[in-house]
Amino acid sequence: MTPSFDLHVTTEDPATVISLIGDLDYHTARNLREKILELHSQGVNNLVLDLASLEFIDSSGLSVLVASLKRLRVSDGDLTLRSVSDQTRRVLEVSGLSRVLTIG
Amino acid sequence: MSVPSKGIDDGAPLSGADLAATLNAVNDAITVQRPDGTLVWANDAAARMLAYDSPQAVLSAPPSELLSRFNVLDEEGKPFPLEQLPGRLVLNGLPAPETLLSWRCGDSEAIHWSLVRATPVTGPDGEIRFAVNVFRDDTARQSAIQSLQRSEGRLVLLASASRALLRASLDPVEIAQSLTEVCVPGLGDLCAVWESNPSGETRKIAIRSVEPGQLADPDETPADVVAALSGESTLSVGERHDRFSRVAVPIPGPDGPLGAILLVRHRSRARFVHEDLELIEEVGRRAGGKIENANLYAERSRAAAILSQSLVPAEIQEVPGLDVFGFVRPAASGVGGDFYDVVSLADGRSLLLIADVCGKGVEAAALTAMARYTLRTLAQYHASPAELLAAVNEALVDQLPDGRFCSLACGAFGPSPKGIRVTVAVAGHPKPFLIRKSGAIETCGKTGLPLGIFYRLDLIEEDVVLEAGDAFLLVTDGCVGEGGVWDPVLSEALSQASPGSAKELAKLVETVAMGVQPDHPDDIAALVARFPGD
């Protein structure tokens, strides 16, 4: 299986934006996890995830969002989601996570 | 032929004796043949080549003895047709190109190489009187070329063995078969592979031979294979008339040999040499790595299967007055984190629950088992679903690694004046369905956070009432898609189903779920409770 997933990092002061492209699932979630760990270790505490090109997210993808949110909140930062599609919004609602994630 | 003359008797013609002495000083073997093929002259080098003491001994030997002594082979090591020898061609008036011949003298093992050129000597009328054969030794150069070719051949073989091992499945027998396919006929005429299991039993699992029957299939385990199975490589060659050669090497594993490889070469082929043994040992090492991986994988699959079996209750606890049926169908790719259960709360009510732990494989299965037994243990201390889930949540926050969580939906079943009251709690999970006797489909419950993320959970319970003929259905997202995208499909199918048993409803859910995700990438699980009434 070829993971159809990619991510791009840009800076929109004061936040750092990661644009997610394709499917964030069991096979690709690790890529995002490692990228966020890397940015966090460089002192990035405010992250925006741009989901305009995200096509699918499963529970492994959600668990990366949860882990990142917890990590950033500990260091007084935040994780914000933007350009959330209707389908992704429904996933976040069913999983209850829309209550804790900031959706911009 | 003119020999430059220079020296004391300058100007005098060279005598026959001088000429013979000069030709004897040449390193090339020279013979002179009559048209009938017999030799009339040979120099010292020719005598040495044919393993005679002197040229005279060569000339007095009968032609049959000479022929039997001089085994001429072509470049591939097959017997060379004698009428094609350059001397014969020349005596028959045919052109003879310079020819590369290899030959063995008598019973000697050593192979020599010569570049042979033949020149005719004609009489006054142009008739051919003799053929002069000059054999230039080329053994050193040809040996170097051959050894280079053999090294290249070994590298090529090693590369194709590695490729074949990469492609082979994780079944030891298939691994062994692909090995024998690479080794025959490239490396030997017969290849057989044995495996030994941890209790010390050995068995032959693959064999391949160039021509079945030409080499006996070893039924019993030969002595050199027994040695290889205990870690020792051997190279052995047969006696003079039985020119088989064979190599047996171990297939090494972390705790001693996993098996052994036997290679046999037929008598018509060059015997195995030490470099071949080293090559086959390397092939054995690579096969060992592959089999070791296969065993690890098999062990993990077994562990995952055992764990996943522990995720399904052996027998669903009976719930008085209810018809209950549940199933978990793991994803096509293996074990996932879906499970269901029926447990008793502190107040005696039955709690039906379904849950999904993030992830796949053994790790998900282990986390699932943990969540399941945490729930079972804590249920006896709590009388309400929201309280129980708050307690389970606290335990899981401390135990679930990095971002993992558990989504769960449940209902506690208690009596009600109109039928059965179900107290529903939903933690980040697809909501339960109510299938009314009339065919109407509703969802129920208020979605809260999944378990295992934050210490605060604050779930809100909701009560619904089941009347006679109604059913309560719990599903995981394998049935309704992420975010419940297949909800309408499932609702439509359920509303059109004629009221049936819990098992019939569960089967319908399974059929619908398999229809919307035909390649079955996610777990599918459902738990149905139907209130038949009376």
Image: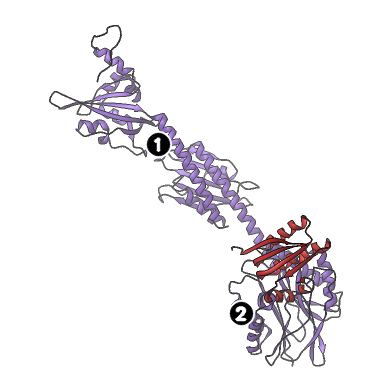
Chain colours: A red, B purple
Q: Is residue B223 visible?
A: no
Mark sitting earlier along the chain (2/1): 1
Above or below residue B496? Residue A61 is above
Above or below residue B431? Residue B299 is above
Above or below residue B469? Residue B198 is above
Q: Which chain is mark 1 on?
A: B
Q: Identify residue type, mark 1.
A: His
* 2 and 1 marks on the same chain: yes
Give the side of residue B266 with respect to residue B14, left or right.
right
Q: Is residue B33 visible?
A: yes
Query: Looking at the rendering, which quadrant does residue B390 occupy?
Result: bottom right
Q: Which mark is residue A79?
A: none
Q: CA distance from mark 2 to mark 1?
A: 71 Å
- Seen from the viewer's position, the closer of residues B190 and B131 is B131
- Give the image location of residue B126, x and y in percent: 14, 27
Identify the residue shown where x is 73% and y is 88%.
B531
Closer to the camera: disc 2 or disc 1?
2
Where is mark 1, residue-wise? B241
- Give the image location of residue B530, x and y in percent: 72, 86
- Seen from the viewer's position, the closer of residues B478 and B112 is B478
Where is mark 2, residue-wise? B511
Q: Which chain is mark 2 on?
A: B
* Residue with the most extreme top position: B8
